[in-house]
Image (spheres, rainbow, N blue to C red):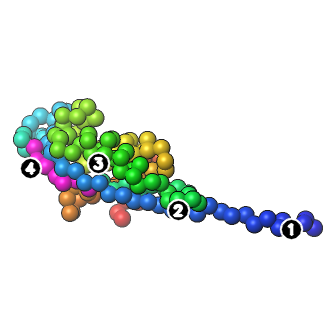
Amino acid sequence: MPAESSAIVKKTPVASLSRRYHFSASHRLHSNTYDEQRNREVFGKCNNPYGHGHNYVVQVTFKGPVDATTGMVCNLGDLDAFARTNLLDRFDHTNLNTLKCFAEKVSTTENLAIECHKIFDSFPFARLENVHVEETSNNSFDYAGEGSTPPEAGR
């Protein structure tokens, strides 16, 4: 019979942290693959040649061990500084269509969520779980990264 260990194994608690950021930007949904008529058919009023704007809300969720000393998954000051430099300074009060990341793809909010994921995936202090982008009170989009399992159809 093996001897019982008197040492107690302590597991580090893991928690999720979500933080929201707000910015305003404009865009025009338009594909160079389509002619003008097809663009109007597919994108409707969102194909307005002068564009239109949204007050976006980006929520990022990180998961990681709760630091025994600070009691945090990550320092919110570090996260906010990262978001200011890499998200807000880049997207706030811009026309998304003029940005390099949308030069070859339509500036949909799905594609914006993917770009936001690329940004926050490089945050060095915690592991990114998901990006949630609200375009309007009726439209929101989630992206959990390449290789994530898509929700079942019909849900």
Residue 56 location (% of width, % of height): 22, 53
Please name which of the two marks, 1 or 3, marks the residue nearer to the observer. 1
Residue 35 location (% of width, % of height): 12, 34
Which stretch appears magenta? 51-57
The residue at 14%/42% (across/down) is: 28
Separation of marks 1 and 3 at Cα, in angstroms: 54 Å
Disc 4 element: helix
Q: Quadrant of the C terminus?
A: bottom left
Quarter-wise, where is residue 36 in the image? top left
Can I make out residue 16 in this image?
Answer: yes
Question: On the image, numbered disc 3 is attached to which residue?
Answer: 110
* Of 133 and 122, the residue lying toward us: 122
Residue 37 location (% of width, % of height): 8, 39
The residue at 32%/57% (across/down) is: 20
**Mark earlier in primary sequence (4, 2):** 4
Disc 1 element: loop
Q: Are marks 4 and 2 in contact (CB under 8 Å)?
A: no
Q: Is residue 147 left or right of residue 29?
A: right
Q: Is residue 67 left or right of residue 113?
A: right
Magenta span contains residue 110: no
Please name which of the two marks, 2 or 1, marks the residue nearer to the observer. 2
Q: Residue 71 bears which disc, if any?
A: 2
Question: On the image, numbered disc 4 is attached to which residue?
Answer: 45
* Of 23 and 147, the residue lying toward us: 23
**Mark earlier in primary sequence (1, 3):** 1
Q: Are marks 1 and 3 in contact (CB under 8 Å)?
A: no
Q: Is residue 135 left or right of residue 14?
A: left
Amino acid, disc 3: Glu
Magenta span contains residue 55: yes
Amino acid, disc 2: Gly
Amino acid, disc 4: Lys
